[in-house]
Amino acid sequence: MAKKYFGLSETEYLELHDLDGRMYLRRSKNEYDIIMIDAYRGWFVPFHLLTTEFYEQTKDRLSDGGVVVQNIEPTTMLYDAAIATMKSVYDHVETYDAGGNVVAVAYSGPKRTKDQLLEQAGLMQDKYELRYPLTELRCFMMKTPSR
């Protein structure tokens, strides 16, 4: 569907797989600079993509300095649980307003400022030539208030 309806095509850095995200990570031996998760429809997220075990899998697959970026629906009961679970695995979880949704950026290691995260996003954009520039995504423009 991504190819047919959204014009997505594979590149040197982008492969398309028709497979559950957790299963893909379990089978993969690769390391990733960015793991992006957008797996909900309305209030529903597959439960196995919100568990400690899943976030530990993402952490195991990240390169040094890598980040997990997850789109989360903030008006559901799952929001607080998802953030708490991410925080139980990662040293840092930053949240950003994405115009009705919240994007969480999780990573381990030293704390990074918003400017450092933006700089890293720019480097990843230059490296991977993503269709939608990471530095222009609204999620990096406005930090969400603490809950």
Image (tube, rainbow, N blue to C red):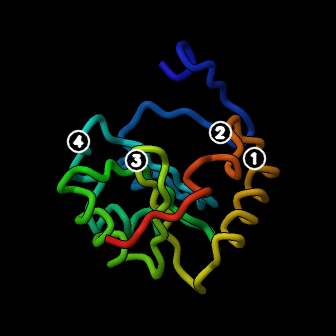
**Between marks 4 and 2, how big is the CA–CA gap?**
28 Å
Vertical arrangement, residue 146 with respect to residue 29, above or below: below
Dot 2 and dot 1 residues touching (CB under 8 Å): yes
Q: Secondary structure at mark 4?
A: loop
Say left or right for 147 vs 118: left
Seen in the image, is 40 located left or right of residue 76? right
Q: Nearer the viewer, mark 3 or mark 1?
A: 3
Q: Which residue is mark 3?
A: 101
Dot 3 or dot 1, earlier in sequence: 3
**Does label 1 or label 4 sit earlier along the sequence?**
4
Q: Please, what is the three-letter code of the amino acid marked with disc 2?
A: Leu
Mark 4 burial class by Cα count in 10 Å: few <14, some 14-19, many 20+: few
Q: Which residue is mark 2?
A: 14
Residue appearing at x 38%, y 69% in the figure: 56
The residue wearing badge 1 is 128
- Residue 107, image x, y percentages: 52, 73
Q: Amino acid at mark 1?
A: Tyr
Q: CA distance from mark 2 to mark 1?
A: 8 Å
Residue 109 coordinates in the image, percent (x, y):
57, 84
Badge 2 or badge 3: first in the primary sequence: 2
The part of the image, by quadrant, that contains residue 93 is bottom left
Residue at (70, 63) in percent of width and height: 118
Give the distance between the C-alpha atoms of the residues marked 2 and 3, in whole angstroms: 25 Å
**Which residue has dot 4 on it?**
43
Coordinates of residue 129 in the picture (x, y in percent): 77, 42
Q: Give the residue at x 60% y 86%.
A: 110
Q: CA separation, marks 1 and 4? A: 31 Å
SS category of the residue bearing label 2: loop
Residue type at mark 3: give it: Asn
SS at circle 1: helix
Whichever of callouts 4 and 2 sits on the residue coming sooner in the sequence is 2
Amino acid identity at mark 4: Trp
